[in-house]
Image (cartoon, rainbow, N blue to C red):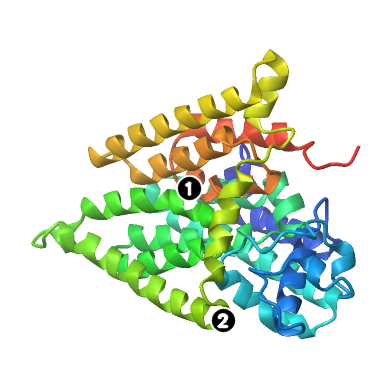
Amino acid sequence: MLAWAPRLGRRFVWAAIVALLLVFACLPPLLSHDVYSYVDYARLGVLHGLDPYVHPPAAAPTDPAFAEVEWTDTTSAYGPLFTLATYPLAKLPVDAAVYLLKAASTAAVLAIAVLVARLAPARGVDPLRAAAFVALNPLVLVHVVGGPHNDALAVLLMTLGVAAVLNARETSAGAAFIAAVAIKASATVVLPFALLAARRPTGLKYAYMSPLRPVGRLLVGMGAAVVGIGLLAWLAFGWNWLDAFALAGENQGRTSYMSIPITTTRLTGLDPDAVRVAFLALYAALVVYLLVWTYRGNDWLRAAAWATTGLLLATAWLLPWYLLWPLPLAALSRDKPLKLLLLGLTAYQLGARIPL
C-alpha cells in the first residue's frame, strides 16, 4: 500500500483505511484486556466511591468488569484526563463501555490519519502514503483499534499539537501537548523539540517579532493546561493522580519478551540489567544529540520522530501498541531510513502478545 498508494488513488486508499478500521472496531477486544481495566477504574470511582489511583480493581472483586481485568492488584497508571473522560462510561453495561472505547480509539486513529494527510503536502510528503503509514500499520489495526488502547487518544492530541506548531498556533500547541501527557506520559518526549522549534520560527509572520515570543506562547498554553487539568484532577483525586506518573516510570523496570534489550540478552547471554543500562545510556546520548541538532536549526519533527523511535528501541518494556507513538511523526519526517526502521520494528512485533 505504501509503494502503490499514489497510483491506487485517493478513493481506494481512504476506502481501505475506513473499511479496515471498521472491521477491527467491530471485533471483540484482541490480545489484551487493558480496555477492561479502563472500564473497571471508571466503575471504581463512580459506582464504588474508590479512588482508582489508590485502590486497584481487586478492591471491588464483585464488579462485572473485574472478571476480565488482568492487572487486578495495580492502581491506575493512566493520566487524570483519560480517567475522568472514562467516568461517564461507568453506568453503562461493561460490553457497551468497551465498544464505546473501541469506537473512540477508531475515530482517533482515523483523525490522526486525516491530520497527517493534511499536513503532508507542506512537508513535501505524499498525503496518501502518510495516511496509510499510520492507519494501515497492522499493529495499529490489531492492538490500538482492535485492543483497544488509549494510546490513540494521546497520540491524536500530540498530533494536534504538532499541527498547531507547524501552523504557528503555539498556545494551542502547548495545551494539546499537556493534554496528551495527561492521558499518557509518553507524549513528554516531543515537548523539548517543540520548544526548540518555537524558538526558531520561520515565515513572514515573525519577521518583526522577537524569536522568544512563540516560545512564550507555547509556555503559556502549557501552563494554562497544567493549571486547568491539574485543578480538575485535584478536585477529583486530590494529589493521588500524581502516583500514576510514578507507576508509569516503574513499568520501565519490567521486561517484555520481545523488547530489543531483552532480545539482545537472549542472543548474547549478557546480564539483562547491564544490557538495559547500556541501552538507556545510548538512548540518553541520542536524545542529547538530537536536541543539539535541533537547536542548530534542523528539522525538529524529524528529531522528535527519532527520539520517540529510540525510546521504543531502548525500553525493556515494549508493547506492540506503543508503535503508534512515532508513526505520525515519522510519516511527516521525510526520513526514509526511519520509516524503514519502523516497518522493520513492526514486522518484528507482529508475533508479540499472541498466546501460542
Mark 2: few/some/many CA within 10 Å (<14, 14-19, 20+): some
The residue lying at 44 percent from left, 48 percent from top is 189
Q: In which quarter of the image is the N terminus?
A: top right
Give the answer, above or below, for where 250 lies relative to 275: below
Q: Quadrant of the C terminus?
A: top right
The residue lying at 30 percent from left, 54 percent from top is 195
- Residue picked out by circle 1: 329
Circle 2 SS class:
helix
Amino acid type, residue under disc 2 in the picture? Ala
The residue lying at 84 percent from left, 41 percent from top is 354
- Residue picked out by circle 2: 236
Mark 1: few/some/many CA within 10 Å (<14, 14-19, 20+): many
Name the image quarter holding residue 138: top right
Q: Which residue lies furthest to the top in this view?
A: 268
Side (left or right) of 306 relative to 240: left
- Contact between marks 2 and 1 (CB within 8 A): the answer is no
Q: Which of marks 2 and 1 is in front?
A: 2
Q: Any mark on residue 66, and which?
A: none
Amino acid type, residue under disc 1 in the picture? Leu
**x, y (%) of residue 248?**
59, 53
Circle 1 SS class:
helix
Name the image quarter holding residue 294: top left
Residue 201 visible from this viewpoint: no
